[in-house]
Image (cartoon, rainbow, N blue to C red):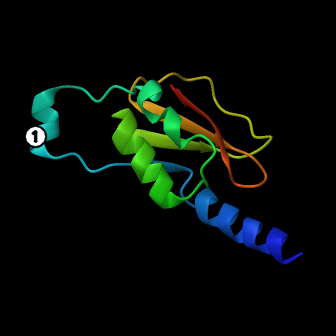
Amino acid sequence: MHRKIAALALASGLAGCATMEREVSPDMVAEGPMTCNAAAAQSHIGHDATQAMGAAILKDSGAFSLRWGPPRSAWTMDYREDRVNVRYDDAMKITEITCG
């Protein structure tokens, strides 16, 4: 029971941050557009879905924004080359990292 409550509390914390964006410095703008590279973030699969992990995935993937995908949720089909998508399961473990 306590485990379910803890998972719900964590899920509600992520739900409040359905998308994350990173701050862009002038140096990053000079380097060109931020394009997602999901291959660079695949090592995070199996880790806990937390804000800190989301920030690490953003950094590793090179994406500008991150979209969380809770279990059994639907996503819009719009494609953004600067966004990384992170799906997680009921145990709050990351199951998939893709771009779009």
Using the image, determine if residue 46 lies above or below residue 17.
above
Q: How many labels does the image show?
A: 1
Direction from residue 83 to residue 11 in the image, left or right: right
The image quarter in which residue 94 lies: top right
Mark 1: amino acid: Asp
Answer whether residue 63 is visible to the viewer in this image. Answer: no
Q: Find residue 65 and report its horizontal and vertical position in percent.
A: 41, 41
Q: Find residue 100 and report its horizontal and vertical position in percent.
A: 50, 25
- Observer-nearest of 38 and 99: 38
The residue indicated by pointer 1 is 27
The image quarter in which residue 30 lies: top left
Q: Residue furthest bottom?
A: 2
Q: Which residue is drawn at 16% across and 38% down?
A: 28
Q: Which residue is drawn at 70% across and 46% down?
A: 70
Q: Find residue 99 and report its horizontal and vertical position in percent.
A: 50, 26
Q: Which residue is drawn at 44% across and 43% down?
A: 57
Using the image, determine if residue 83 lies above or below residue 16.
above
- Observer-nearest of 31 and 93: 93
Using the image, determine if residue 97 lies above or below residue 59.
above
Q: Is mark 1 on a helix, strand or loop?
A: helix
Direction from residue 88 to residue 39 in the image, left or right: left
The image quarter in which residue 24 lies: top left
Direction from residue 73 to residue 98 in the image, left or right: left
Using the image, determine if residue 76 lies above or below residue 9.
above
